[in-house]
Structure formats: structure tokens, C-alpha cells
Image: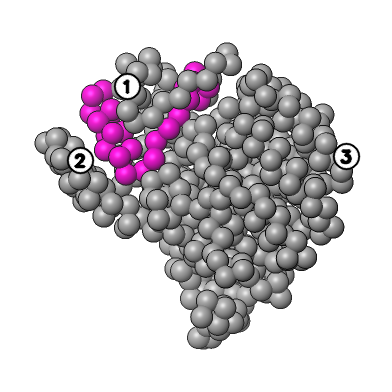
């Protein structure tokens, strides 16, 4: 099966398996899917979802919006205007109000957009010294949308969209910032792009002969949601040849693959795709947040890492679900997340222990929950920067009061009577 079929809100009722759902369940998808973007495809529907137990199936929940992903008042407001067939403008106004309550700009992404030669580069984010994000215009959708996605505004709110198609600006910015070693193509999902677009960007970087550029990373869910992109799509072999070419020129290609559950690794299609990529010299690293209803159990994570290593994938990051969109539906407390990480880590050999986390990608940087401890009679979270807006913050442990209900850095207070975390003053000066 390689013919691609896409389903969105306007045609999801055409999916044959919708016969398993009640009319109420279908309407709930329409209500929440009017607020949060909805898209899936025939690979997810036919090969990943167990329709005999769809209500608890992780891939059904990951793709099909659930009623509980909106608070009761928001759900009711959207359902009401849809039921009475309100004018399009009225529906849009109601939906917009709900969307703006869902924190569409998490982790201060706007503050990551650089100004270059007097202009904001709205298709670039540069938060960490060595690493730059590039949002190619042609890659700002996905083969299927994850219901937890922190970049949901890319597909739903134009004023929060990051995108750029000018390869020359990309090159100029990397050349002007010699500390940048890594360019991350992100989205959306860059792997939805045709190979000819990859060639445009990659060849521009090659021709510029930028000595500081060492790694090109591609953030993608395609291995899990459409592995045929790397096997039987009509330009799949061209893409692999391009990756080989970049490797020969001395630039490492790394796929930052999103695998939320071990079952994503078990189909023949994904196994073939992983093998082809590795044979082409591509490094594959995996990352995922901990998600209630999906993978909030140590055994699931241990199995995930073991399967990845068996296939040649490097476990990279365990994240904490970001403070946006359906966070309340997916959130696991910081303490529970750390326990899941610890108990999963204890089940695997050292070859799987390349994974870092659990980590919050928040405004100041990637903050790791190292553990829970008691110091001078006070129970505390031990925290550490894995990445920071200021590289000097990295690897410097700090402490927060223990809060069993905390799910994000904003829920935490400094321990030991200190008024601020050590980084806060300089962080606010950066923002100013």
C-alpha cells in the first residue's frame, strides 16, 4: 500500500472505519477539529489504529481530536454554533477566542526570530548559539497531525505561522553567524516536501561552502506516519541520493524522528524505511513527550528505546508536554514524568541510555528534571539546563520547591527561600 490518501475535517466521514463511531463521537471530532487542526492518512488509519479497541488506541487518540481536549465551556461554545448552522464569520470568531486561550505561542517562540539586515526573518528561529531552526515554506504541513502538537498554530492561526522560502537568506544568516554548526529543518514536517525543494536548500548551503556548518537535522514524524516517503514515493530514491551527496561533502544528515509509542516501529514499512535511511548514511535520533493516554508508563518507554536501538535508531530526548493546545488532556506531573523516566531507564542497557530527559522546552531553554531530593529538610526538584539561551547556564544544577501537581516550569518556585531562579535576571534582560 503506497497510494497516499489524506483525510481532514471536510472528508473524515469518508474513512471506512468511521462506521465504528457513533454520530455523537463523529460530531465531537468535528467540534474539536474545528479548533485544533485535524489531518490523518490511510497508513495511520489502516496500519496503526486497532479499530476493535479504537477508543483507547494510542494512534486514534494521537490523530482524532477528543472531546476532552477542550474545556467544557469551550467545547459547548463551538458545538452550539455548529449545531445551529451559524454563519461562517460567527463560527470563526468563536473558534478564534477558544484558540487564543490555548497559549498559541509557547516558549516565547516570537522572541527566537532574529533580525537580520534590519528585517525579521520569520522563517528562522535562533534560540541556542550553535543551533538554528529553518521553516521551509513547502514543509509547513504534515502527513498527519498529532493532537498534542505544540506547533498547532502553524496550521490554524496565520499570525503565528513561521515560514520562509528564500534559500539565499538562509545561507546569508548561517554565514553571518559562524557559531552556528547545526541547521534544523522543521515545520510542520519538512519530509512532506518534494525532493526538488530539499535540493534547492541543500545545494545552496553546499555551494556557499560554509565551514562552520557541520550538521543538517530534519525534524519529522514521517517515519511513523508515512514511511513510504523514504521507500516507494516517486522521489524517495532521489532524496536518499541527496542525503548521500551531503554526507560525501562532509555534512552530517540527522533525522530527528518522532516516535510516541513502540507500535509505530513494528510495521514492515517503517522497518524498510529505517534500513534505507541508515544505509544512505543518515543518522536517526528519536524523541517524544510523555503523554497521558498514550505512553505514560515506564514499560512503554523501555520497549520503545529497545526497539529503536535494535533498528539502529538513537534514543535522544524524552520531553514534557508543552504548555499549549490540549496540554491539560495530555499532561503528566513533573514528578510522575521523572518516575517514568527513571523506571524505564532502569530497564534498559547502556546502549539505550543515550536518551536525555525528562526535559521542558520552555522560554529560557531545555530544563531537565534530574530528580527529587531532600536537602536541609526541604523536599526539592533538582533541575538542570540541557540547553539555554545563555550557554553558561548549561550543566548548572538548581532547585525548586517540590510540588506534586506541577506540570511545567511556571508552576515551580525556587527552593530554600530564594526569590528567583539563578537565570531569571539575565533572562529578563535578554527579553528586554
Q: Is residue 221 visible?
A: yes
Q: Is mark 3 in CB contact (under 8 Å) with mark 1? A: no
Mark number, residue 334: none
Q: Name which residue lies at 32% across and 57% down.
A: 100
Circle 3 sits on which residue? 248
- Image coordinates of residue 206 in percent, x first then y, are 80, 47
**Dot 3 lies on which element?**
helix
The spot of residue 362 in percent (x, y) is: 54, 63
The verdict on residue 34 being magenta is: yes
User: Which quadrant, please, contains the N terminus?
Assistant: top right
Name the image quarter holding residue 406. bottom left
Where does residue 49 sit, x and y in percent of width and height?
A: 48, 24
User: 10 Å neighbourhood of mark 3: few (<14), some, or many (≥20)?
Assistant: few
Disc 1 is placed on an element classified as helix
What residue does disc 1 label? 13
Q: Residue at x 65, y 20 (%)?
A: 234
- How far from the left and from the top, in percent, is residue 373? 61, 69
Residue appearing at x 14%, y 35% in the figure: 85
For numbered disc 2, what is the local secondary structure? helix
Query: In the rendered image, which residue does mark 2 sit on?
Result: 88
Residues packed near mark 2 inside 10 Å, few (<14), some (14 to 19) or many (20 plus): few
Q: Nearer the viewer, residue 132 or 81?
A: 132
Q: Residue at x 32, y 21 (%)?
A: 13
Q: What segment is highlighted magenta in the picture? A: 22-46
Q: CA distance from mark 2 to mark 3?
A: 53 Å
Amino acid at each position: 500500500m503506497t497510494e497516499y490518501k489524506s483525510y481532514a475535517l471536510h472528508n473524515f466521514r469518508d474513512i471506512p472505519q468511521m462506521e465504528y463511531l457513533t454520530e455523537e463521537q463523529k460530531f465531537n471530532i468535528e467540534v474539536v477539529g474545528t479548533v485544533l487542526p485535524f489531518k490523518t492518512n490511510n497508513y495511520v488509519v489502516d496500519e496503526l489504529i486497532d479499530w476493535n479497541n479504537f477508543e483507547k488506541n494510542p494512534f486514534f487518540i494521537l490523530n482524532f481530536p477528543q472531546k476532552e481536549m477542550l474545556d467544557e465551556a469551550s467545547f459547548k461554545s463551538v458545538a452550539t454554533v455548529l449545531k445551529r448552522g451559524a454563519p461562517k464569520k460567527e463560527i470563526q470568531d468563536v473558534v478564534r477566542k477558544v484558540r487564543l486561550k490555548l497559549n498559541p505561542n509557547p516558549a516565547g517562540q516570537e522572541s527566537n526570530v532574529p533580525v537580520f539586515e534590519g528585517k525579521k526573518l520569520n522563517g528562522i528561529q535562533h534560540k541556542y548559539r550553535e543551533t538554528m531552526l529553518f521553516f521551509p515554506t513547502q514543509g509547513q504541513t504534515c502527513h498527519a497531525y498529532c493532537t498534542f502538537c505544540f506547533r498547532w498554530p502553524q496550521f490554524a492561526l496565520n499570525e503565528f505561522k513561521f515560514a520562509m522560502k528564500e534559500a539565499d537568506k538562509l545561507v546569508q544568516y548561517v554565514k553571518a553567524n559562524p557559531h552556528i554548526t547545526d541547521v534544523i529543518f522543521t515545520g510542520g514536517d519538512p519530509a512532506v516536501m518534494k525532493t526538488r525543494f530539499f535540493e534547492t536548500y541543500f545545494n545552496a548551503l553546499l555551494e556557499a561552502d560554509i565551514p562552520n556548518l557541520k550538521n543538517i537535522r530534519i525534524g519529522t514524524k514521517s517515519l511513523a506516519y508515512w514511511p513510504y516517503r523514504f521507500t516507494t514515493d516517486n522521489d524517495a530514491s532521489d532524496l536518499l541520493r541527496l542525503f548521500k551527496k551531503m554526507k560525501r561533502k562532509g555534512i552530517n544528515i540527522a533525522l530527528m524522528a518522532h516516535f510516541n509509542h513502540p507500535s509505530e516501529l513494528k510495521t514492515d514499512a517503517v522497518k524498510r524505511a529505517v534500513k534505507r535511511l541508515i544505509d544512505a548514511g543518515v543518522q536517526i535520533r528519536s524523541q517524544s513527550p510523555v503523554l497521558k493516554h498514550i505512553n505514560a508508563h515506564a514499560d512503554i518507554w523501555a520497549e520503545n528505546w529497545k526497539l529503536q536501538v535494535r533498528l539502529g535508531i538513537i534514543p535522544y530526548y524524552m520531553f514534557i508536554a508543552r504548555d499549549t493546545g490540549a496540554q491539560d488532556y495530555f499532561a503528566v506531573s513533573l514528578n510522575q514524568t521523572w518516575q517514568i523516566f527513571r523506571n524505564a531507564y532502569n530497564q534498559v542497557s547502556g546502549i539505550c541510555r543515550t536518551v536525555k530527559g525528562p526535559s521542558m522546552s520552555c522560554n529560557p531553554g531545555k530544563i531537565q528534571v534530574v530528580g527529587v531530593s531532600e536537602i536541609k529538610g526541604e523536599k526539592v526538584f533538582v533541575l538542570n539546563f540541557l540547553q539555554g539561551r545563555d550557554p553558561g547556564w548549561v550543566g548548572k544544577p538548581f532547585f525548586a520547591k517540590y510540588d506534586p501537581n506541577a506540570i511545567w516550569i511556571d508552576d515551580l518556585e525556587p527552593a530554600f527561600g530564594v526569590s528567583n531562579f539563578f537565570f531569571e535576571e539575565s533572562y529578563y534582560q535578554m527579553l528586554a
